[in-house]
Image (cartoon, rainbow, N blue to C red):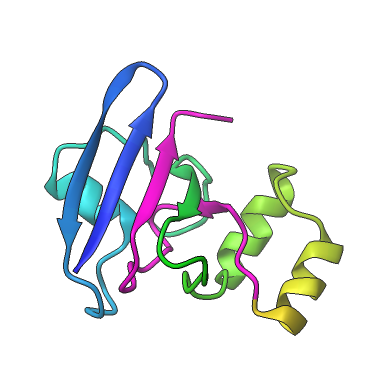
Amino acid sequence: MANITFSHPEYKDKTVYAVAGSHTDTILKIAKENKIPIAFNCQDGECGTCLVKVTHLSDGKEKGGPLTDKEITVLKGLGKITQEQVDEMAVTDMDHPWRLACQMIVRDEDLRVEYGVE
């Protein structure tokens, strides 16, 4: 089980429990199931509407999984990531705080997901 705390500047934080390891439960899917109003359009990682900032709260070891190719392209276009950071992540396995909610799969770790922030 993973605890995901959704945070928005204008709403009270809401923590939900998510089943980790399904390999299909994205942040966006969990948000929709729990009536968390994360904005989205394409749901396919191409528009960037569902941009979120993710903080890993579990034991300090980030396990969020690698950025998808779609995420890298969109995040670069939004100015949230540089090619240098992409290259460094490929070597160090570090995660990046900016993600697309429709692309990030939930793993067995507690997360803080900030939405509605730029």
Q: Where is residue 85 in the image (x, y as percent from the top left)?
A: 79, 63
In the rendered structure, the answer to whether residue 98 lies left or right of residue 91 reads: left
Identify the residue at horizontal 30%, vertical 73% (top origin). 108
Q: Does the magenta stretch include residue 100?
A: yes
The range drawn in magenta is: 94-118
Q: Determine if residue 23 is in view.
A: yes
Q: Does the magenta stretch include residue 26?
A: no
Q: Where is residue 74 in the image (x, y as percent from the top left)?
A: 63, 53
For this orientation, the residue located farthest to the front is: 59
Look at the image and tell me in which quarter the N terminus lies: bottom left
Identify the residue at horizontal 52%, vertical 29% (top origin). 117
Quadrant of the rendered image containing residue 57: bottom left
In the rendered structure, the answer to whether residue 96 lies left or right of residue 87 reads: left
Look at the image and tell me in which quarter the C terminus lies: top right
Q: Where is residue 24 in the image (x, y as percent from the top left)?
A: 26, 73
Q: Position of residue 87 (x, y in %)?
A: 81, 74
